[in-house]
Amino acid sequence: QPVEPPVVAAVVVRPAAPLVPPAAAGEAAVFANSFELAASSVETGAEGPVVTLWWAATAAPGADYTIFVHLLDAAGNLVAQADGPPNDGLSPTRVWEPGDVVRDVHRFPPGTVVPDGGRIRVGAYRPDTGERAPATLGGAPLAENRVELRVTSDE
């Protein structure tokens, strides 16, 4: 039977100077009581929508999380999604420590178009169980443990 090679050591590389997210308007949503969505941007162009998220760790997350980024039409139907681990897997939440800031870019498939009245929802879930990370805003639970981002057009 195939056997996975043992992990002998792990190295976490952090930037020489901490990343600083762009200024955000309003209060940040908190996920799993350990990281917050400090800032975000949604840009649309010829290649399709690109969502940039800035995560700030306030505590060490107790699990690994995958970020979900869903594009919905005006009726709430799923049009496209761009789920994935933070920073294309280079910054897993299991290594985050308080004060860490991670820039996380999610690209929808080429040709994806934001429909009129479309919206983008963002959250986090455990890939091993599918369970969403609890999300709050100002201490109050967020519906479906997700936040909704504003979409602007660059075209």
Image: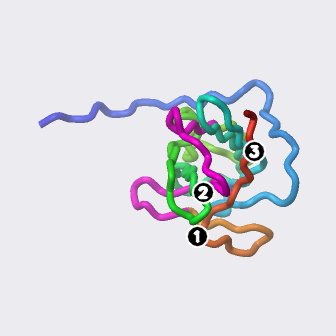
Taking the magenta stretch, the answer to whether it contains residue 116 is yes
- Spatial CA distance of label 3 from label 1 is 23 Å
| Image coordinates for residue 65, horizontal then vertical, percent | 53, 51
Q: Which residue is mark 1?
A: 144
Ranked by sequence position, the earlier of labels 2 and 3 is 2
| Image coordinates for residue 36, horizontal then vertical, percent | 72, 54
Count of labels in the image:
3
Q: Which residue is mark 2?
A: 123
Q: Which residues are magenta?
A: 105-132
Instruction: Look at the numbered discs 1 and 2 and tell me whether their residues touch, using CB distance below 8 Å.
Output: yes
Q: Is residue 64 visible?
A: no
Q: Nearer the viewer, residue 149 or 144?
A: 149
**Quadrant containing the N terminus in the rendered view:** top left
Q: Report the predominant secondary structure element of the magenta stretch.
A: loop
Q: Nearer the viewer, residue 115 or 3?
A: 115
Q: In the image, which disc is placed on residue 152?
A: 3
Q: How is the image coloured?
A: rainbow
